[in-house]
């Protein structure tokens, strides 16, 4: 190390130190604590000693049908995000970029608008839409002529994710549209003109020119979508009511919350909750690794 | 170059000073150091949009003005956020000195688990509070909190008397009387009973708690079942669950109830869309249509099919929540005395009367309290119901965790035709045993 570099060390530590300390306390410490907790029976609310219980919490989790139900719902949310929000956002961005519609600014604002609203507000708004004799039920009553018709998809575990998927697409598509639009605007118009002169149709321009050029953006969006979907709690919590609806729509973060914070019949509930949260992180890392691998293989 | 090094050094020093001063200021503010005041950490219940929260802020401001040596350092949260934060604070060791708490399986569980419940019997001024109105909360008669009011009735039928009269109907004495109202109500395009069936807890607290006591004939069936004296697969419990099915089949409650949430339920009743509303006594202050509120009769559920005579007219009721010292708060005499002083101020006669008028409590626990004669009609109804109706167990005061969740969700499944009573009874029994 040069003498000049050694002289700069105090300044370096003074600049980086505060942020590093905050990072270690707020991010690193809870992660290490959570991993350690998941291998113990410790209940921080009750106090007492830590006892190492090995993989007990993980074994309990994998034999719990609620875990698999929540994981299935979570994977549906991931699928909706990756195969719903991102493609729709991309197509909308392309339509705006190529000026295939009039009043592009209006549509851009309209699609992005939900992203400005609090997720809790959106959840409550959609809950009102789906309630008994709510707007959607009224629409069904008017169109079917049956005054007793009700929108009841939220009551069944097989159908609850359809309305939630719709709400998810409504909220987040605008975000991906803006990301893609910003990156599309950086593309040199001459490339598209050249493709047109060579006889490329609009779909060919889209798939052969635009998509490959935005492969990096697509990958970043997929990572964002996966991470956001797996930790998503607020929307599903607020769009459902306590009881049957929330049980039907349970995703891993809600399962973790209910286990750790509400299930007093399980004395090891904090350790169990920590195990669930660690698995959420692990699944997230696996899915991100898969998407990176696929993007390399397909060179998207 | 020299300038840039100087600039880096200055920025670095400035950041360090900022960091140290921020952390230091936070620590100083938390300890109350330097202010010369007794800082009492409190956890309050309410928010800025409800009467409970607005009153709390006003009372704290007035108390601190009257007692400049005491600083009530509070955190106020409501509903789910409150329950979540209690657990988080206790787990983190950030125990408030006094808090809004209960003593049962729902409101008391986190405090009990953290060993923060504190027996108030030797601390409370029994010339101020009426001990005979505060039930024992622990195995040896301990009192862990001062309830805001006497027992909290959770199974009330609110009857819109004016609407009933306009349809030529009178108060039901039996369940069959409710069934007889179905065609009349349907012809008018309204429901007989509205309930917030989308909230799982409403089925347990506001319906099933009275149904199991009535059908079994044992007012303490639930606490005994949790203690192992009864099984949830017993005929009385299965029949009680089947009664929910019967109510839907008979049209007394519609199957769409499972899509109605708390706010919509009160709104439906306030707007005359149902003859009755099933809820707890606390809703009395939330009926915003004065015409409906002034013409509401609060009653116990009528006689149910197969109900033994000695269970007639009973309502499920739990010990009301209130404010209490934590063990941590009680360990410091200065803080303890300051907290107790605030608690007495909070429960003072004018504040208690306001709470009574707001419909937040059934009746005060103050010694020698004279009930004002000019109370709103619905509040008088509530007091009268509390005086005449025998009390039975509230389910979630005894049953907690996943067994209680499975029961609440199970009742919603029964009502929406997805499960049978026997299936849900077996599931709850297995979870209680586990």
Image: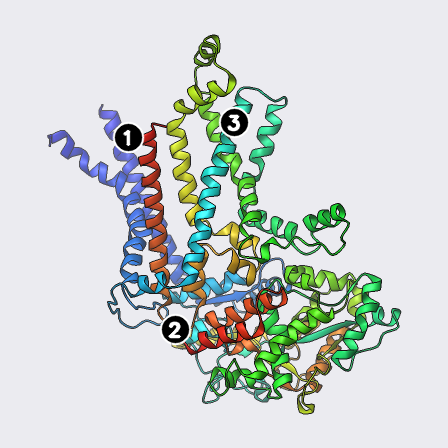
What label sits on residue A116 in the rendered view?
Answer: none
> From the image, which quarter does the N terminus of chain A lie in?
top left
Numbered disc in front, either 3 or 2: 3
What label sits on residue B7 in the rendered view?
Answer: 1
Question: Residue sitting at 58 percent across and 74 percent down?
Answer: B421
Mark 3, residue position: A93
A113 is higher (above) or lower (below) than A97:
below
In the image, is B61 to the left or to the right of B192? left
Would residue B374 be visible to someone looking at this image? Answer: no
Q: Dot 2: few (<14), some (14–19), or many (≥20) neighbours within 10 Å?
A: some
- The part of the image, by quadrant, that contains residue B236 is bottom right
Q: Mark 3 near mark 2, Cβ–Cβ under 8 Å? A: no
Cα distance in 3D space between marks 1 and 2: 51 Å
Mark 2, residue position: B114
B186 is higher (above) or lower (below) than A158:
below
- The part of the image, by quadrant, that contains residue A238 is bottom right
């Amino acid at each position: 190390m040069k003498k000049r570099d050694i002289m700069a060390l105090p300044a370096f530590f003074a600049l980086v130190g505060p942020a590093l300390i905050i990072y270690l306390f707020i991010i690193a410490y809870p992660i290490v604590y959570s991993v350690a907790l998941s291998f113990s029976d410790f209940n921080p609310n009750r106090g007492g000693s830590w006892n190492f219980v090995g993989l007990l919490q993980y074994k309990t989790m994998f034999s719990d049908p609620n875990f698999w139900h929540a994981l299935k719902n979570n994977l549906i949310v991931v699928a909706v995000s990756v195969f719903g929000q991102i493609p729709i956002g991309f197509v909308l961005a392309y339509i705006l970029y190529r000026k295939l519609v009039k009043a592009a600014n209006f549509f851009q604002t309209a699609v992005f608008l939900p992203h400005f609203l609090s997720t809790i507000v959106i959840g409550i708004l959609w809950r009102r839409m789906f309630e008994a004799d709510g707007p959607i039920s009224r629409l069904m009553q008017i169109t079917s002529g049956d005054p007793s018709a009700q929108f009841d998809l939220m009551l069944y575990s097989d159908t609850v994710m359809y309305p939630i998927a719709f709400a998810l697409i409504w909220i987040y598509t605008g975000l991906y549209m803006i990301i893609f639009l910003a990156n599309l605007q950086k593309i040199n118009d001459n490339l598209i003109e050249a493709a047109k002169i060579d006889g490329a149709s609009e779909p060919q321009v889209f798939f052969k020119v635009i998509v490959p050029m935005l492969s990096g953006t697509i990958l970043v969006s997929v990572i964002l979508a996966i991470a956001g979907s797996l930790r998503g709690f607020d929307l599903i919590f607020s769009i459902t009511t306590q009881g049957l609806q929330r049980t039907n729509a349970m995703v891993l973060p809600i399962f973790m919350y209910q286990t750790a914070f509400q299930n007093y019949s399980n004395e090891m509930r904090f350790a169990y909750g920590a195990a669930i949260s660690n698995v959420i992180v692990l699944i997230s890392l696996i899915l991100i690794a898969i998407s990176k691998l696929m993007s390399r293989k397909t060179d998207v | 170059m020299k300038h840039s090094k100087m600039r880096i050094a200055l920025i670095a020093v400035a950041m360090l000073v900022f960091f140290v001063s921020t952390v230091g200021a936070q620590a100083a503010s938390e300890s109350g150091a330097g202010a010369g005041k007794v800082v009492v950490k409190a956890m309050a219940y309410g928010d800025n949009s409800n009467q409970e929260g607005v009153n709390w802020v006003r009372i704290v401001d007035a108390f601190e003005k009257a007692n400049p040596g005491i600083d009530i350092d509070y955190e106020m949260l409501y509903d789910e956020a409150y329950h979540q934060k209690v657990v988080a604070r206790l787990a983190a060791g950030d125990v408030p000195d006094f808090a809004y708490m209960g003593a049962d399986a729902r409101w008391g569980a986190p405090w009990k688990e953290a060993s923060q419940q504190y027996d108030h019997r030797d601390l409370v001024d029994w010339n101020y509070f009426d001990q005979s109105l505060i039930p024992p909360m622990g195995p040896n008669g301990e009192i862990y909190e001062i309830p805001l009011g006497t027992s909290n009735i959770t199974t009330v039928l609110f009857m819109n008397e004016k609407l009933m009269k306009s349809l030529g109907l009178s108060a039901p004495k039996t369940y069959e009387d409710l069934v007889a109202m179905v065609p009349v109500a349907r012809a008018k395009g309204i429901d007989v009973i509205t309930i917030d069936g989308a909230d799982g807890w409403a089925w347990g607290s506001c319906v099933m708690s009275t149904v199991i006591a009535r059908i079994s004939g044992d007012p303490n069936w639930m606490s005994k079942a949790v203690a192992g004296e009864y099984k949830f697969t017993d005929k009385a419990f299965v029949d009680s669950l089947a009664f929910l099915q019967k109510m839907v089949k008979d049209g007394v409650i519609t199957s769409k109830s499972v899509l109605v949430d708390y706010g919509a339920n009160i709104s439906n009743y306030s707007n005359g869309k149902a003859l009755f509303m099933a809820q707890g006594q606390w809703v009395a202050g939330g009926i915003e249509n004065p015409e409906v509120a002034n013409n509401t009769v609060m009653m116990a559920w009528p006689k149910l099919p197969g109900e033994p005579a000695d269970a007639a007219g009973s309502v499920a009721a739990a010990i009301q929540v209130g404010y209490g010292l934590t063990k941590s708060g009680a360990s410091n005499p200065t803080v303890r005395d300051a907290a107790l002083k605030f608690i007495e101020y909070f429960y003072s006669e004018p504040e208690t009367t306001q709470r009574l008028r707001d419909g937040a409590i059934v009746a005060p626990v103050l010694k020698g309290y004279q009930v004002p004669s000019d109370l709103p009609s619905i509040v008088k109804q509530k007091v009268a119901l509390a005086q005449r109706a025998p009390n039975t167990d509230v389910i979630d005061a005894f049953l907690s965790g996943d067994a209680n969740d499975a029961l609440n969700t199970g009742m919603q499944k029964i009502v929406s035709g997805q499960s049978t009573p026997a299936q849900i009874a077996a599931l709850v029994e297995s979870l209680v045993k586990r």
